[in-house]
Amino acid sequence: DTGVSQNPRHKITKRGQNVTFRCDPISEHNRLYWYRQTLGQGPEFLTYFQNEAQLEKSRLLSDRFSAERPKGSFSTLEIQRTEQGDSAMYLCASSSSGSVVYGYTFGSGTRLTVV
Amino acid sequence: AQSVTQLGSHVSVSEGALVLLRCNYSSSVPPYLFWYVQYPNQGLQLLLKYTSAATLVKGINGFEAEFKKSETSFHLTKPSAHMSDAAEYFCAVSERGATNKLIFGTGTLLAVQP
């Protein structure tokens, strides 16, 4: 069990560029979550998948954001036409059950800076 | 909608002193409650969770929290602070039977003075 892996750890991009982040969950976990954390705030829910199905999306996830989990394993989060307000830490988490009782395992995050 | 309020964005204690980080939740039905810790440039690590099995919950690193329904609180405590406890702590809530997403508080940054 290598935990939840996120790549890259850091990304600096120019405003208007597209970026893509990857998350590799714990292999036996069927649920995968994306959160966004800005400075001084707690993580905010963006979206989650059960297997390959995207079951819920937050209103925070504008049409410039898209997430996929094509084979129910790794997931990607893409941001198109980045804006300075997108600068944040993007956290991925996975869980092995439909019940939150078991808790999530978080990755170390991808820190995005839009300049 | 569920929410949690963490009182005190910054808390400073001396090494060896009691740590008390406050969390209040809003819910008419007892939810699931969690405390996570985040070290600089790291993800979140689960400290402990309340799922109704017991009101006093013990977690890792000597932390514990007590669920008090009458006060809608789930405060985090540790009898004796260690320098390595310096980090940001987040309280989170999830509704029972809902989509399992966690709603986080704004966090409390704990500083431990030598």
Image: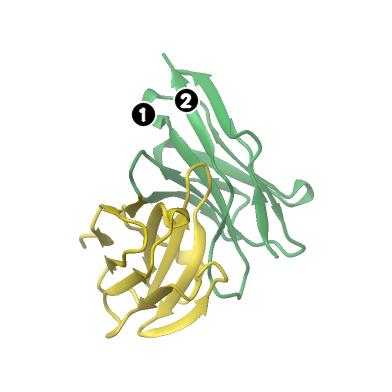
- Along the viewing direction, whichever of A13 and B66 lies nearer the viewer: A13
Residue B84 numbered mark, or none: 1
- The residue sitting at 73% across, 65% down in the picture is B29
Q: Colour of chain A?
A: yellow
- The residue sitting at 55% across, 71% down in the picture is A58
- The residue sitting at 50% across, 33% down in the picture is B109
Q: Residue furthest top?
A: B114
- Along the viewing direction, whichever of A32 and A112 lies nearer the viewer: A112
- Along the viewing direction, whichever of A54 and A95 lies nearer the viewer: A54
Q: Amino acid at mark 2?
A: Ala
Residue B3 sits in which quadrant? bottom right
Q: Colour of chain B?
A: green
Q: Residues within 10 Å of mark 1 (few under 14, many from 20)?
A: few
Residue B10 sits in which quadrant? top right
Q: Residue furthest left?
A: A2
Residue A30, x across and y down, in percent: 35, 78
Q: Please, is residue A103 above or below residue B64 in the view? A: below
Residue B47, x across and y down, in percent: 45, 47
Q: Chain of mark 1?
A: B
Marks 1 and 2 share the same chain: yes
Residue that mark 2 sits on: B111
